[in-house]
Amino acid sequence: MNLSYRLKTVASFVPEGSIVADIGTDHGYIPIYLAEQGKITHAVAMDVRTGPLERAEEHIRSHGLKNVIETRLSDGLRELRPGEADTAVIAGMGGELMIRILSEGRHMWPTVKRWILSPQSDLHKVRIYLRENGFPIEKETMILDEGKYYTVMAAGRRAEALRNCTGEKTIYDFYGKCLIQDRNQVLSGYLEWERGQKEKLLEELQSGGAQMTERAVLRIRSLEEELKRIKEAQDEMQ
């Protein structure tokens, strides 16, 4: 099974010998890859939609892995029972949906040892949620794949955390304490790119002069705060 760089990065966060629940499995690529690598003992590939789940079943069957990977129709973690997985993968969806899935899956919190997350938006909300609910981020990376930036993080429970990359600073919520402290080069490039985008937009808005609307004024203030946050993150990475 050939995976994209993004999915390979997600798969690399799965510990050897894991029993995995892949939430929103889509085509089932991650559990198939992990099984072929001999990295997992069992997997439950779950999706809320029948179409993707049927495609996942076809792929699992064609790779001869029905004895290792089972499929299950489920909205998030609802149909997963305690003890059926020690590692959960939730990737390829927005941060707010990910938070909902985590919240509605509280019955799995005591038995899942590692949560591997790759939110496509609202990363700061996910990091805040993890911190406030006792899930220290143990490991985090940022990659650039086909022109798009992706973040992958692994969180555990407070008592079992191998490393705590959770911090109270606002810049840690937005850009990741681990990424900043490790001077992640992709994050460094992202911050530079994001700063350029926001400076350009700020300049365009400020050129409005006396004709500036109240909405534009509020957006300017927001951009100034965002640029201040980016500079703080860049300064800490020096």
Image: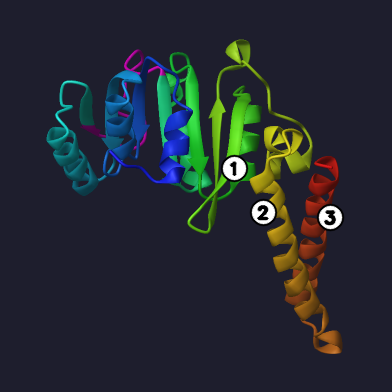
Residue 76 is a magenta residue: yes
Q: Is disc 1 in contact with disc 2, using a CB cutoff of under 8 Å? A: yes
Residue 110 on image: x %, y %: 47, 14
Residue 23 numbered mark, or none: none
Q: Relative to residue 11, is residue 5 depicted above or below?
A: below
Tell me where residue 223 appears, x and y as whole percent. Answer: 77, 64
Q: Earlier in the sequence, mark 3 or mark 1?
A: 1
Q: Please state which of residues 85 and 231 is positioned toward the viewer in this rendering.
A: 231
At x 31%, y 20%, the residue is 38
Residue under numbered circle 3: 228
Location of the N terminus by quadrant is top left
Q: Main secondary structure of the magenta part?
A: loop
Mark 2 surroundings within 10 Å by alpha-carbon count, few (fewer than 14), some (14 through 19), many (20 or more): some
Determine whether 190 is above or below 85 in the image: below
Q: How is the image coloured?
A: rainbow
Secondary structure state at the residue bearing disc 3 = helix
Percent position (x, y) of residue 61? 13, 34
- Which residue, given by chain and number where applicable, does mark 1 sit on? 142
Mark 3 / mark 2, whichever is N-terminal: 2
Comparing 165 with 180, the one in front is 180
**How much space separates mark 1 and mark 2, taking CA atoms?**
9 Å
The alpha-carbon separation of the residues under discs 3 and 2 comes to 15 Å
Left or right of 150 on screen, residue 38: left
Front position among marks 3 and 1? 1
Q: Is the residue under label 1 in contact with that under label 3 (CB below 8 Å)?
A: no
How would you rate the neighbour count of disc 1 (Cα within 10 Å): few for under 14, some for 14-19, many for 20 or more? many
The residue that disc 2 covers is: 190
Q: Secondary structure at mark 1?
A: strand
